[in-house]
Image: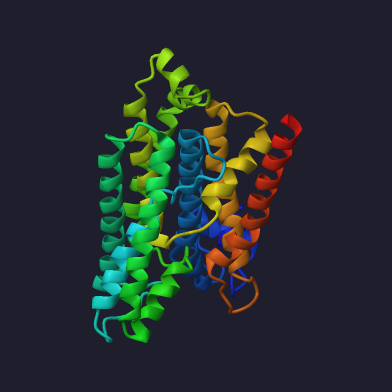
């Protein structure tokens, strides 16, 4: 799927020539090398990293809150990043450059930094509250309420912003894997790698949490510590993706369920790497669909992920209702 994601686009590059370009050989047409290495390769790497990050973060949140509908953005990290970007958009000058794919210079760097700072600020608030809140359900409700409040502040800010600038924000909200350059990946990839490494290291405590915090304590798990580490790790993954790609929807909530069905297990020793690979696969597939191969059109990534993810969420809800009815 990675090779396919690099091969397809508005310009058709033969699959064998794509492989030649990826392995360092020169394609027969020099233009194909530029297209593959400088445009499509960063996009495919970004899609794979974003899909893996959001899927693992979603799995962490669903396990921590014992809620099948929890996702990486439940605690308001995405809303915090959106606030940071909205501040930048509202403050840039009319000639300050665009914020579409391939934007470079201070405008691009400023928006990525603003998104990361906004996400970090919300995470800091959540971590402070987590020290005083014992119930994860209460913490989840606080996160949802905080996210709603921050989103309202963003809407108010955009209402006072010039329409041209507000439009830039809404373009960012639609999400994109195409705006990340090879230079951006030198920051994005280590951030995601750090978050994924932390998630893989937390497999045993998360398995213990499957049966509740009380059981986990009897197994010697330091619940508050693992809760804080899980929140930091999931927020690092979600915040990094949001800063570079925008708030990519549905991957974090749907892919963990797909991985569970494929592997038929809740054991995080298998489910964590399974969600990582499935998330990368699904994100790459969505990236291919968004390119509308053979045309010059490009769909926002959130349109594709929503069309794929919405039926899965509905199926999860219906299945949960059926299970409750069966127990009753």
Tell me where residue 160 appears, x and y as whole percent. Answer: 30, 81
Question: Which residue sits at x=37%, y=25%?
Answer: 223
Does the rendering let one see residue 278? no
Tell me where residue 215 appears, x and y as whole percent. Answer: 47, 17
**The quadrant where residue 232 appears:** top left
Question: Which residue sits at x=38%, y=73%?
Answer: 169
Does the rendering let one see residue 114? yes
Q: Is residue 178 above or below residue 320?
A: below
Tell me where residue 71 appears, x and y as whole percent. Answer: 49, 47
Question: Which residue sits at x=28%, y=51%?
Answer: 120
Left or right of residue 188, residue 9 in this image: right
| Viewer-nearest residue: 104 or 170 | 170
Left or right of residue 317, residue 230 in this image: left
Labels in figure, total: 0
Query: For the C terminus, which image quadrant?
Result: top right
Left or right of residue 99, residue 121 in this image: left
| Viewer-nearest residue: 71 or 136 | 136
Tell me where residue 261 appears, x and y as whole percent. Answer: 68, 37
Question: Which residue sits at x=32%, y=85%?
Answer: 162
Q: Is residue 232 above or below residue 164?
A: above
**The quadrant where residue 259 appears:** top right
Left or right of residue 208, residue 96 in this image: left
The residue at the far right in this view is: 326
| Viewer-nearest residue: 228 or 234 | 228
């Amino acid at each position: 799927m990675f090779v396919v994601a690099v091969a397809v686009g508005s310009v058709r590059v033969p699959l064998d020539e794509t492989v030649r370009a990826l392995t360092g050989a020169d394609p027969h047409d020099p233009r194909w090398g530029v297209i593959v290495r400088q445009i499509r390769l960063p996009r495919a790497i970004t899609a794979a990293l974003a899909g893996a990050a959001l899927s693992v973060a979603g799995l962490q949140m669903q396990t921590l809150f014992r809620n099948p509908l929890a996702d990486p953005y439940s605690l308001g990290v995405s809303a915090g990043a959106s606030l940071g970007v909205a501040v930048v958009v509202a403050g840039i000058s009319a000639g300050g450059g665009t914020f579409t794919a391939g934007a470079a210079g201070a405008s691009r760097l400023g928006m990525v930094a603003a998104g990361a700072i906004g996400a970090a600020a919300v995470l800091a608030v959540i971590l402070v509250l987590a020290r005083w809140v014992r119930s994860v359900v209460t913490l989840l409700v606080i996160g949802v309420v905080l996210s709603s409040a921050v989103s309202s502040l963003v809407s108010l800010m955009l209402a006072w912003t010039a329409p041209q600038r507000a439009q830039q924000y809404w373009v960012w909200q639609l999400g994109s894997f195409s705006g990340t350059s090879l230079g951006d990946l030198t920051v994005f990839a280590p951030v995601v790698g750090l978050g994924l490494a932390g998630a893989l290291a937390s497999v045993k405590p998360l398995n213990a949490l499957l049966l509740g915090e009380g059981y986990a304590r009897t197994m010697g798990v330091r619940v508050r510590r693992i809760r804080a580490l899980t929140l930091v790790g999931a927020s690092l993954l979600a915040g990094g993706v949001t800063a570079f790609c925008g708030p990519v929807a549905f991957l974090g909530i749907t892919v963990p369920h797909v991985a569970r069905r494929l592997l038929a297990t809740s054991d995080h020793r298998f489910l964590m790497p399974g969600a990582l690979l499935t998330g990368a696969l699904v994100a790459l597939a969505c990236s291919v669909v968004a390119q509308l191969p053979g045309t010059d059109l490009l769909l926002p990534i959130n349109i594709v992920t929503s069309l794929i993810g919405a039926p899965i969420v509905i199926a999860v809800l219906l299945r949960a209702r059926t299970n409750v009815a069966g127990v009753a």
